[in-house]
Amino acid sequence: MQKRCDEDGVFVVEGPKMAAEAMKSGFAVRAVCATTEWMETYSPTPGLECYEVSPAELERLSNFKTPNQVWMLVERGDNSSFPTPHSSLVLALDRIQDPGNMGTMMRTADWYGIRHIVCSTDTVSCYNPKVVQASMGAVFRTRVEYVDLPQWLSDCGMPVFGASLQGNPIGEAQRPDGTAVLLIGNESRGISPEAMARVTHPVLIPNIGGTAESLNASVAAGILIDRLWTNN
């Protein structure tokens, strides 16, 4: 299914909340498969290609164990051309593989008004169904680019803050005084050596408890965004 979606330039959206986000986003909805309950509640736009399906049929389409009323195919367009409202931060993601982490970081960025995310080419697709679902609508509001990340970091002309065990503790780190990049690395391997070489401000979240081996990548991103960029 994912390969076919990639070839056709579409992505899957599931559930009433995400379907509502899709329909108000301006993205073109190519097709809808939904239960009678959803059809009667949401009254799809006339002319939209809609198919009324049973819960059992919806389950066969769904990527999730518990399907939720509606399944949509939405055209991707080109979100690299999205306008990026003024923000003091660009989020850069290096080799992120877990769809839940990727979607959660998109959701967190959306909450803080960060509209530009730059990813290494081996980061999971922002259109992966689990990423889309975890993003809770951020996929419709965020410019996501896939680039040669070390080269992009070299060329961006901004200070690069990177999560690192060798960094300055976050409480002592210099806060950015303008637009900057926050770089988050792979869940188990961290930031690649090539990308780390472009980090100008390594920062560390101290392990106060002293027991856990590491922080979840999306949790670390949320802490760093909040501590370094709020009230900036």
Image (tube, rainbow, N blue to C red):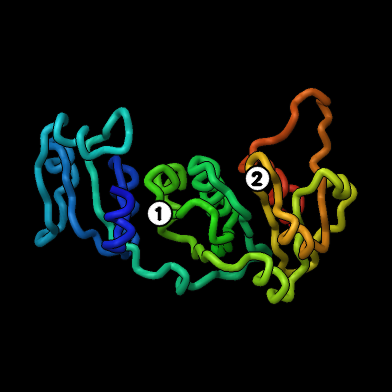
Numbered badge on residue 222: 2
Q: Residues within 10 Å of mark 1 (few under 14, many from 20)?
A: many
Residue 197 position, x and y percent, is 79, 62
- Measured along the vertical axis of the image, is residue 20 above or below residue 27? above
Answer with left or right where residue 49 lies relative to residue 69. left
- Which amino acid type is marked by label 1? Tyr
Local secondary structure at mark 1: loop
Q: Residue at 81% of width from left, 25% of height from top? A: 209
Q: 10 Å neighbourhood of mark 2: few (<14), some, or many (≥20)?
A: some
Q: Which residue is mark 1?
A: 127
Residue 151 in percent (x, y) is at: 67, 71
- In the image, residue 222 sits, relative to residue 147, either above or below, namely above
Query: Quadrant location of residue 195?
Result: bottom right
Between marks 1 and 2, how big is the CA–CA gap?
A: 21 Å
Q: Of all residues shown, which one is farthest toward the top? A: 211
Residue 135 pos. (x, y %): 46, 47
Q: Quadrant of residue 30?
A: bottom left
